[in-house]
């Protein structure tokens, strides 16, 4: 999303996506997932970078006030849009899961809640 300098550190504004996916036979099964804006404070150490701090937005008001504080005036609207719509970030994660699990590229995600609602009740 954005990179800003703060003295000797860099502030990296990102939108992270996480989703639980597994293979069950021919199904690509989805569990929980989320996407959120994060602000990473990194520092150059011995020729590499070390994350010193990770800031997450506060709950409430769709995270708008805290995302506006975390990001620059140009980065905040982009971060809010991506976290609200998801863009195609979840699609990329699912495409990778299909490839890793050896499933056809057109395999739909079946969510655990869908499987639970179709299973027969136990005696």
Image (tube, grey):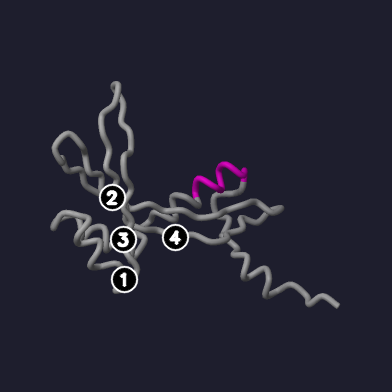
Q: Earlier in the sequence, mark 4 or mark 2?
A: 4
- Which structural element holds mark 2? strand
Q: Nearer the viewer, residue 49 or 36?
A: 49
Pinpoint residue 16: horizontal percent, then vertical percent: 38, 52
Kindly report the distance in space between the C-alpha atoms of the residues bearing marks 4 and 2. 16 Å
Mark nearer the N terminus (1 vs 2): 2
Q: Earlier along the polypeptide chain: callout 1 or callout 4?
A: 4
Q: Measured from the top left, where is residue 35 in percent x and y?
A: 40, 58
Seen in the picture, residue 111 relative to 19 is either above or below; the reply is below
Q: Are marks 1 and 4 in contact (CB under 8 Å)?
A: no
Labelled pair 1, 2 in contact (Cβ < 8 Å): no
Which quadrant, please, contains the C terminus?
bottom right
69 over 114 or under it: above or below: above
- The residue beneath circle 3 is 57
Residue that carries the numbered disc 4 in the rendered image: 34
Question: Mark 1 packing: few (<14 Cα in 10 Å), some, or many (20+)?
Answer: few
Q: CA distance from mark 3 to mark 4?
A: 13 Å
């Amino acid at each position: 999303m954005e990179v800003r300098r703060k003295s000797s550190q860099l502030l990296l504004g990102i939108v992270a996506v996480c989703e639980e996916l597994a293979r069950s036979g021919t199904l690509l099964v989805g569990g929980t997932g989320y996407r959120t804006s994060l602000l990473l404070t990194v520092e150059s150490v011995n020729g590499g970078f070390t994350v010193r701090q990770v800031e997450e937005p506060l709950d409430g008001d769709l995270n708008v006030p805290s995302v506006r504080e975390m990001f620059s005036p140009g980065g905040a609207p982009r971060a809010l849009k991506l976290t609200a719509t998801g863009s195609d970030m979840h699609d990329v994660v699912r495409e990778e899961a299909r490839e890793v699990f050896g499933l056809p590229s057109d395999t739909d995600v079946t969510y655990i809640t869908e499987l639970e609602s179709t299973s027969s009740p136990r005696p």
